[in-house]
Amino acid sequence: MALKNNTWKLNQWYDQNVAGNISYSGAPQLWAWGKNDQGQLGQNSRTKYSSPVQIPGTNWAQLCGRGDPSGILATKTDGTLWVWGSNIGGNLGLNSQINYSSPVQVPGTTWSTTKHQLGGLYYANFAMKTDGTLWSMGYNNKGCLGLNAPETSHRSSPTQIPGTTWSTVSGGMIGYAAAATKTDGTGWVWGNNQYGSLGLNQTHANTFRSSPTQLPGTTWSRISLGDQWYSVLGRKTDGTLWSWGLGSDGELGVNNRTAYSSPVQIPGTTWTNEFVGSNKNWLAVKTDGTLWAWGENTRGALGQNQAYAQLNAASSPIQIPGTTWSQVGKLGFGACMALKTDNTLWSWGYNASGAGNLGQNQGGSAYYSSPTQIPGTDWSDIFGSTHADNAFALKNV
């Protein structure tokens, strides 16, 4: 039937008056899976899950699962900071050393919701506020809290690291080292300098810095530390990627197995800020959506459809199939995950000791040497918890 003059179909009215004028981002849900021996999955239990389960609440924004083996930090869109899991040394910032199996709020409502502004390492955590201040909490081994204080000076409540223009932060798990960048493009490191992992052209095993010390250069956009074997990566604003520290299994990505105490460039100029390292390998995404891996191939962690016996390591980046990758995360020793632009989530590598950290509903010690999809198509952000064998991801629903 023909329309009368000056009348509208419903979809015509919607297109003209609604579409493009409003947006709906949902109320982000937080999901977790894997090992749960310290309550790190936020389920008010110690039960492990081999498939994603929802953590109570909505409007989650960012998460860091690298502090302690299982101390978790997360922010919500309202600027609140929530913590749970293991609290050794007071790394949860609650002025106690009590473990929590459900999220508990840290005082304050101006904590940052921006990615790469939460960080953690063994028994210590870092969090930024919206005013650009950086705060640390937990054990101060090797001066890793960055407070210019003795190693025995621990903090169970957030304590400010000097400065007000911080932009990203990262911790290095067992290495007791940390790194951060500022809005002026400077890069800063502190903590343990084992194998030259601070990038300051020093290799003395017992050298450490208890205050942030500047790296050469003023164009750093992000610096991230591996979790166990003292390798470090940093990206510059021109899209170049640099590495330093221990390279015994090619984890520095510069086609050798040498240690470097100063930054050396990994080939390529189109790297993004999406890169992450765990035991002896790294993942990184380029601007064209390609995903690259290098280092040790533990349980197929390099995603090449080859087990360790066929490919034990790669000392230069090798591409994982696909061209629509957007984010990367580590899930424990030899386990990885990555997000695609279509909001699908993929995992591969080692399903550590039946922890279920691959999210594939596998309770045994299975492993996958190629990316395998985790159910669902509405994932929006991913966060690994490398040493504790568990994972976290946001859904926008």
Image (cartoon, rainbow, N blue to C red):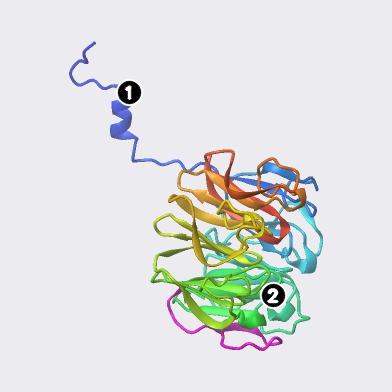
Residue 176 image label: 2
Residue kind at label 2, given as amino acid type: Tyr
Query: In the displayed structure, does residue 229 sit left or right of residue 185?
Result: right
Relative height, residue 83 to residue 8 (above, below): below
Q: Position of residue 248 (x, y in %)?
A: 63, 74
Identity of the residue drawn at 55% across and 46% down: 345
Q: Residue furthest top?
A: 1
Q: Position of residue 129 (x, y in %)?
A: 56, 66
Q: Residue furthest left?
A: 5
Query: In the displayed structure, does residue 6 sit left or right of residue 45?
Result: left
Residue 217 belongs to magenta span: yes
Tell which of 233 and 157 is nearer to you: 233
The residue that label 1 is drawn on is 10
Question: Dot 1: what SS?
Answer: helix
Q: Position of residue 284 (x, y in %)?
A: 51, 62
Residue 372 belongs to magenta span: no
Identity of the residue drawn at 69% across and 74% down: 175
Question: Dot 2: what SS?
Answer: loop
The residues colored magenta run 200-220
Bin the neighbour count of mark 1 within 10 Å (Cα to Cα): few under 14, some 14-19, many 20 and up: few
